[in-house]
Image (cartoon, rainbow, N blue to C red):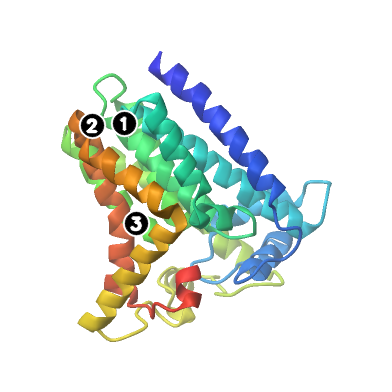
Amino acid sequence: MRWTRAGAGSLVAAAIAAFVYGLTLSPSVGAGDSGELILAAHSLGIPHPPGYPLWLLLARCADLLPWGTVALRVNALSALLAAAAVGLFYHLAVRCGLGRPGRIAATLVFGGSTLVWDSAVQAEVYSLATVLFLALAVAAVRARSSRSAGARADAIFFFAAGMALLAHQTLLFPALVLAAWVLLRRTSPARCFAAIAWTLAGFSLVLLLPVRSGAHPWLDWGHDQNLAALWDNLLRRNYGGLRQNPFRISLIADEVTAMGGLVVASCGIVGIALAAVGAVTSGRRRAVLLPLTFAVLTIPAALVAFLAFTPDAEHLAQ
């Protein structure tokens, strides 16, 4: 019964979000990587590392729709993915035990945040990454549940984990946290082997990159026609590498402060206050909320530890 209520509420939340994002949808090419990604979708080419094969296939399907411009169709994909993320967020709130007022308020803050909304109205990979993170979270909760745990729930989670790595590389870290949380419930060699197999199955879509590179598309950033080139592309070696600055305590403080300020500005003081109240009063829900929160925090932690980016307007916009 809970899943029925959660599903109905999720559909309503997603439909409302799709309508609102659709009203504010960019009609043309947006800023940043938008133009490159639209070209990649239209030509089934390979954008900048790591290539984003899952997004590429979805965007190509959107490009084939018989209405609007190429840019509008690919932008609409972002809106639909962001709306799906809003629906999954509501579903996750139900699974975490939030009451109706709490889950509605949380979903409004999430869906109305500028971080989510900005990525929902133009061609970008972030809406897909958000959907897959939330899908991982929902699948992890199901795999941990005494009522729904089993081989099927494990397969769904680990297959989604493999696909999540193709949506955005930062999802590696929450995927590892959630995978450990799922496996710690009942660890066995057979279960671990199955987890690896399903993860590789989800990740196998990466082979689209060398296949398309061999067809010599208009846009081919990495020229991934062999495994060595594909590996370099996945590690971003032909994109300037990962680390942008040497280690400095002052830089870490600047990064943390800038990202924290961005979240506050995105959700608003009221949204942050509601989240804090919810965390303090979570009670028995902490058994679920703590690992999910830790999984979320691994993303900014990884950006600070491995990227060491300069916290200027350009990097924060990404």
Say if residue 60 shows up in the picture.
no
Out of 30 and 313, give the one closest to the viewer. Answer: 313
Out of 316 and 198, give the one closest to the viewer. Answer: 316
Identity, as a three-letter code, of the amino acid under mark 2: Arg
Q: Marks 2 and 3, Cα distance to the nearest angstrom? A: 25 Å
Up the image or down, 222 lies above or below 101; here it is below
Identity, as a three-letter code, of the amino acid under mark 3: Leu
Q: Position of residue 104 (x, y in %)?
A: 45, 32
Q: Residue at x 69, y 46 (%)?
A: 22
Up the image or down, 227 lies above or below 6; here it is below
| Mark 3: few/some/many CA within 10 Å (<14, 14-19, 20+) | some
Identity, as a three-letter code, of the amino acid under mark 1: Cys
| Mark 2: few/some/many CA within 10 Å (<14, 14-19, 20+) | some
Mark 2 or mark 3, which is nearer to you?
2
Out of 114 and 28, give the one closest to the viewer. Answer: 114
Q: Earlier in the sequence, mark 2 or mark 3?
A: 3
Instruction: From the image, tell me which residue sits under label 2.
Output: 285
SS at badge 1: loop
Res 308 quadrant in image: bottom left
- Is the residue under label 2 in contact with that under label 1 (CB below 8 Å)? yes
Instruction: From the image, tell me which residue sits under label 1.
Output: 96
Q: Residue at x 68, y 69 (%)?
A: 35
Residue 172 bears which disc, if any? 3
SS at badge 2: helix
SS at badge 3: helix
Q: Marks 1 and 2, Cα distance to the nearest angstrom? A: 6 Å
Q: Earlier in the sequence, mark 1 or mark 2?
A: 1
Q: Residue at x 29, y 69 (%)?
A: 256
Q: Earlier in the sequence, mark 3 or mark 1?
A: 1
Q: Position of residue 209 (x, y in %)?
A: 56, 62
| Mark 1: few/some/many CA within 10 Å (<14, 14-19, 20+) | many
